Image (cartoon, rainbow, N blue to C red):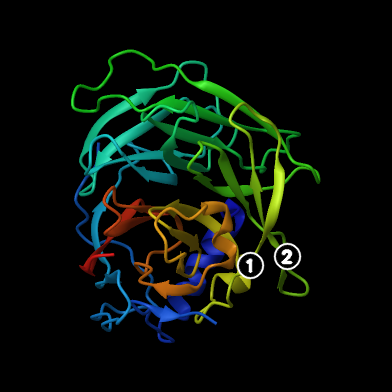
Amino acid sequence: MIDGRRTVVLVAGLVVLGACSGSGSAGAPATGSQQPSAPATDPRRPSAPEPACADPPCYGAAETTARLSSDVVVEVSGTAASGRVPGLYYVVGDEPGTSSVAVVRADGTPVTTLEIRGMDARNAEALAVGPCGDGSAAGCLYVGDIGDHVGRDDVVVHRVPEPDLTEPPTSPVDSDVLRYTYPDGPTDAEALLVDGQGRPLIISKAAFDRDSGETGPTRLYRGETGGGTLEAVGTVRLPEPEDGLLAGFVGNVVTGASAADGRVLLRTYDEVLEFRAGAADADVAGFPGWPVRRVPDGGLVQAESVAYRADGCGYLTTSELTGDVARVGCTSAP
């Protein structure tokens, strides 16, 4: 989330600087809903074919395909693909008191709303789908109430067994409430992953010093399946953005994440980065050490979430400001 007091300034800055456009690359190594009539894309980045890449998976140009209305979610802060019903996506907003997660298709069509019994999120910022942590083959939806905009001593992750979305539940679904504390004090975060054992991984939203223009370290934490004190796993080194307009206002910070088969996507306000292990069964907690490349970012204003498709061949990214959804597909499979 960008502080609402700066949103108008940031958008105005994008318009004024629109002539200074750049373009993302398809694999450059790094050093109710409604169909949009005129989707709001970043004016810095004109639509253009993305260059081919020689290192699969290769991605095509991003296409803005939908706009989620405020009836579906007010401000999209987290997105995750359903593992049980491919083609459906969970989305959540970050407003205080959030008690539900919406389910939509890739074109923005609403499917249902899942009310989560007992959830009263203070700042839900992230979603992930992964193992439930009980040794079964079942998958769970993880709702990360991990934002620190309201000040808090601990954070909460709600773990919900994935329902059958072909026949959506008509009553609130149960969840396990996992409470975590940081080993080094309260921390803001907007990105969540889940490892192969069902352990949540939280990626911090680094502090930004407006006076110096410096962004602090981005840290990775892992929690046990039942809650408790988070383990500090390491630090994520983010490459400097090629076109860091928003980073100049709010820092080069992580606002969303997704994982699939030895790959991790990180969303920043300016870019989408893909870390790749080279092995599908690699421990996702090791991603900070994997090779990283830039992939198409969708050109959305104030983009805050990203989610691989269920088959891992492409992804969606969404704008918190406008609700626009950009879809990126594969030109060659992983």
**What residue is disc 2 on?**
216
* Three-letter code for the amino acid on which mark 1 is drawn: Gly
Q: Residues within 10 Å of mark 2 (few under 14, many from 20)?
A: some
Placement of 21 over or under 279, stated as above or below: below
Estimate the x, y position of residue 333 in percent, counting from the top left: 23, 65
Q: Are marks 2 and 1 in contact (CB under 8 Å)?
A: yes
Q: Could you tell which of marks 2 and 1 lies nearer the N-terminus?
A: 2
**What residue is disc 1 on?**
251
Estimate the x, y position of residue 226 in percent, counting from the top left: 61, 26
Between marks 2 and 1 in the image, the one whose residue lies nearer the viewer: 2
Front position in the image: 66 or 87? 87
Front position in the image: 212 or 333? 333
Q: What secondary structure is marked by label 2?
A: loop
Q: What secondary structure is marked by label 1?
A: loop
Picture quarter containing residue 45? bottom left
Placement of 240 over or under 88, stated as above or below: below
Picture quarter containing residue 75? top left
